[in-house]
Amino acid sequence: MITITTIKDMRDYSAEVRRNGKTIGFVPTMGYLHEGHLGLVRESVLTSFRTVASIFVNPAQFGPNEDLDKYPRNTEKDKELLEGVKADVLFFPSVREMYPEGYSTYVTVEGALTDTLCGALRPGHFRGVATVVLKLLNIVDPDRAFFGQKDAQQAIVIKRMAKDLDLRADIRVMPIIRDEDGLAMSSRNVYLSPIERAKATVIYKSLSAAVDLVKKGERSVREIKLAMSAMLEAEGVRTDYIAAVGADDLRPVEKIKGRTLIAVAAWVGSTRLIDNVIVER
Ligand code: AMP
């Protein structure tokens, strides 16, 4: 695997691959890689001639009181992991390379997709995400780009942007990878103390309870949310939201009907975690 740090070298690499009529798969990440990321890379390696993974902790998507400065990093370990799953290129630009002095352009996906869920609580977050993803897609110019269902709203926002702006890349969304106890893998799990780590499993337990309720015929979102919040509260886990929304349009629903995304954002101690399931009726 080679590491590329400049936009020019990344463009040259991709142009050469494409000149030879070959395909590029791309996996954007913020690093501190885990099996969730590696699953995306494996899928890219299976489907594309060359796979580029990027590591860039994007300042534009962090709010002023968020964890940008303490976001976990371990690039040497990440490189080993990427080598292990046969990525061809690590694109690892600096903040200066991506946002040089005078940088002034941002992309916003407007309306219902970003007004809700994390968008309502993290102003500017999806503006930062859309901007960096568009820049990365322009630089890497992949045939397909892989994202995780773990960040369900992000995946929908990026798909919308790709469609609206006629991007060339095919946006693919892969299932959530979990630890054995169900906790969705996340770079932020490293913040959790052992006690918090144990408490955090209630998030997926509450989502699984929601799935069971729907299977048993429960349609009322109010009842499902009550059951979930009781479980979360019992563990002292505070929620930013428990939401049931249309899986494609993110509009709130009162009854489970069609494909519905049930999503949670919760605080375990000072760590904010998100997770979700899709139920279908
Ligand atoms: P991040 O480094 O957190 O920005 O994540 C980079 C990509 O990996 C995003 O598309 C995430 O949705 C995806 N991802 C993160 N965690 C998981 C997971 N547990 N399962 C599947 N995809 C994930």
Image: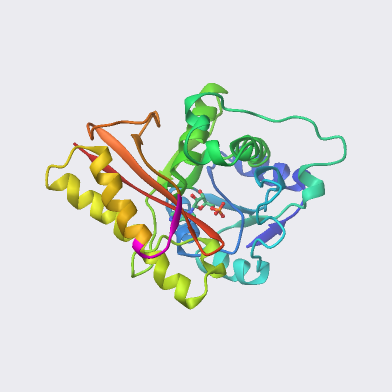
Magenta stretch encompasses residue 235: yes
**Near-viewer residue (243 or 33):** 243
Q: Say whether residue 2 is visible.
A: yes
Q: Is residue 118 left or right of residue 57?
A: left
What residue appears at the point 43 percent right and 48 percent down from the top-left corner?
Answer: 47
Residue segment shown in magenta: 234-239
What residue appears at the point 79 percent right and 31 percent down from the top-left corner?
Answer: 104
Q: Say whether residue 45 is visible.
A: no
Q: Is residue 280 left or right of residue 197?
A: left
Above or below: residue 88 compared with residue 179: above
Q: Dividing the image into 4 quarters, which one contains the N terminus?
A: bottom right
**Near-viewer residue (199 or 257):** 199
What residue appears at the point 66 percent right and 65 percent down from the top-left corner?
Answer: 73
**Near-viewer residue (2 or 255):** 255
| Colour option used | rainbow
Number of marks drawn: 0
Q: Is residue 8 left or right of residue 46?
A: right
Q: Check the image and name the residue furthest to the right.
A: 101
Q: Position of residue 194 (x, y in %)?
A: 47, 77
Q: Position of residue 208 (x, y in %)?
A: 26, 55
Q: Check the image and name the residue furthest to the bottom.
A: 194
Q: Position of residue 197 (x, y in %)?
A: 45, 71
Above or below: residue 227 compared with residue 76: above
Q: Check the image and name the residue furthest to the left.
A: 216
Q: Position of residue 90 (x, y in %)?
A: 64, 57
Q: Dividing the image into 4 quarters, which one contains the C terminus?
A: top left
Magenta stretch encompasses residue 49: no
What residue appears at the point 41 percent right and 47 percent down from the top-left corner?
Answer: 149
